[in-house]
Amino acid sequence: MKIIILLVVMFSFQAHSQILAPREPFTTESFFVPSTESQTLEGSPIEETAIEAQEMEEPIAEPKNIEPEEKRTTATNRRDSFGSVMLGYQVLNTWVPAKKTISYTQNFSEHWGLELEYATSKFSLDIAGIDLGRVEEDRYSLLGKYFVGNSFYFNFGAYVSKLEIFVGDKFADTLGNKINDSFIMDIYGASFGVGNRWIFNNGISLGVDWLRFNMPLATSTKQRVLKRLDEENSDDIKRVEKVFKNFPAFTFIGINIGYTF
């Protein structure tokens, strides 16, 4: 019995001494336990690749140079077109006024074009005090056009003018009889002029020939009527012929409208 009591006392003393034993002081080193995962990733190829990816800068997209849309003008419309078809009316011109015209212009560039024009008119004329009766004129012109700026142009080229002059009732033959006949003149010359032509975005075209100068260089005349006239009337016809040969013809304010394609 004594032995049992002695063993109990010894066990109780040993347990009490363990409970009262001092604990180790608290430190941050004992609190934080290094992570096995972080130790594994540190210095690994995966970490190096991640760091390199962060260090690489994304390329900055450069803004595209967007050219502004070209403003359409008469000059650009002419440059981008093929040709123009025009109808016209020449208000004031010599020698036969009020000509009606039709023309085609081939547009080569912003500055150059080539025009073929046909003009015609019938009118009663009084030239150098001589009543000629009715005069019919058909004129064919081939003109180069040089454009300066937007719409203003100079034109230059050649023309052929066919005149048929019907003598009036005052003309009489050598027997004093009234005659009704004509003589024909072909006039070959050079033409110069200035004007404006506008081409709108829808193709409609307007033009003004401000001034045109037609200088005769050569003539050809069929004078069958002169053989039938008396001397006085024959001299009148020759004087008219001289005027057509030696004096230039002018055109003032020719209006044109058409379409450019």
Image (cartoon, rainbow, N blue to C red):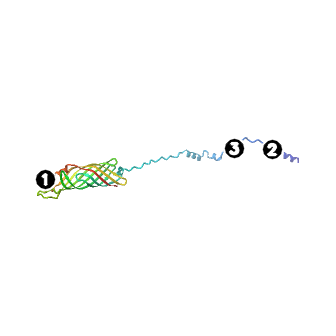
Which residue is more in the foreground, 213 or 155?
Answer: 213
The residue at 80%/44% (across/down) is: 16
Name of the residue lying farthest toward the right: 1
Going by the numbered disc 1, the residue's amino acid type is Glu
Q: Could you say which quadrant of the image residue 225 lies in? A: bottom left
Task: Give whichever of discs 2 and 3 has the lower sequence position.
Answer: 2
Quick one: quadrant of the C terminus?
Answer: bottom left
Measured Cα–Cα span from mark 1 to mark 3: 143 Å
Image marks 1 and 3: residues in contact by CB distance under 8 Å? no
Q: Nearer the viewer, mark 1 or mark 3?
A: 1
Task: Give whichever of discs 1 and 3 has the lower sequence position.
Answer: 3
Badge 3: residue crowd in 10 Å (few <14, some 14–19, many ≥20): few
Q: Residue under circle 1?
A: 232
Which secondary structure lies at badge 3? helix
Q: Position of residue 12 (x, y in %)?
A: 82, 45
Measured Cα–Cα span from mark 2 to mark 1: 170 Å
The residue at 15%/52% (across/down) is: 236
Q: Nearer the viewer, mark 2 or mark 1?
A: 1
Q: Position of residue 62 (x, y in %)?
A: 48, 46
The residue at 13%/53% (across/down) is: 232
Which residue is more in the foreground, 159 or 64?
Answer: 159
Q: Residue under circle 3?
A: 31
Which secondary structure lies at badge 1? helix
Q: Could you say which quadrant of the image residue 19 lies in? A: top right
Q: Position of residue 101 (x, y in %)?
A: 27, 55
Measured Cα–Cα span from mark 2 to mark 3: 28 Å
Q: Residue under circle 2?
A: 16
Q: Could you say which quadrant of the image residue 139 lies in? A: bottom left
Badge 2: residue crowd in 10 Å (few <14, some 14–19, many ≥20): few
Going by the numbered disc 3, the residue's amino acid type is Phe
Going by the numbered disc 2, the residue's amino acid type is His
